Amino acid sequence: MRRNLIDALLRYAAARFPRQVGTTFPNLRPNARDRGNANVPGVAVRQQTRDVAFVLREARTRWPRLAHFVFVEDDFRLCPHGLAAIHYALAKADAFFNADWIAVRASFGLNGA
């Protein structure tokens, strides 16, 4: 397991990612400036949702054999054993659900998707 994590980190460090991969899904309400509420997402949340959906679609297009996709926030610091914990959670989900699962929640909001 540790060797797989090290290999993944080295591949990630060597990867070259484009600054901008393209545009997100179209905004069907471009003039909307609503803040939203607890039951109806506002313009910023809708934009974030479109961006996340676009990133997932782009990842699937670029790497069609991708087994897992991990969201990493740029404003959250990963603890020293964070990747090992993520690897453990994914392996546990694969074993428990026979690899038939969609997501593992680690927190609330997008920082735990």
Image: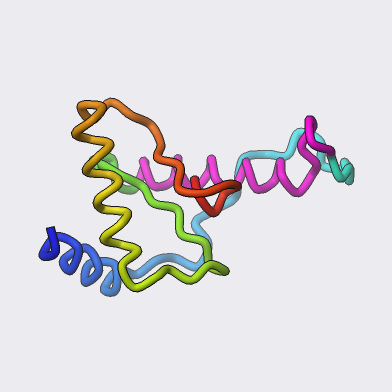
Q: How many marks?
A: 0
Tell me which secondary structure the magenta stretch mostly adopts: helix
In the image, taking residue 110 as reference, residue 57 lies left or right, namely left
Q: Residue at x 14, y 64 (%)?
A: 2
Please state the horizontal and vertical placement of residue 26, each as a whole percent of the image: 68, 39
Q: Judge whether residue 9 is colored magenta.
A: no
Looking at the picture, how far across and down is residue 94, in whole percent? Answer: 23, 35
The magenta span reads: 37-61
- Of residues 41 and 51, the one nearer the viewer is 41
Q: Quadrant of the N terminus?
A: bottom left
Residue 21: where, in percent of width, then height? 49, 57
Q: How is the image coloured?
A: rainbow
- Residue 50 at what x, y percent from top left? 62, 41
Q: Nearer the viewer, residue 30 or 111?
A: 111
Question: Residue, x 28% and y 36% (percent of image)?
Answer: 93
Q: Is residue 48 left or right of residue 31?
A: left
Q: Determine if the magenta segment contains residue 43.
A: yes
Q: Quadrant of residue 103?
A: top left
- Residue plotted at (34% across, 70% down): 16
Viewer-closest of 53 and 58: 53
**3 w.r.t. 63: above or below:** below
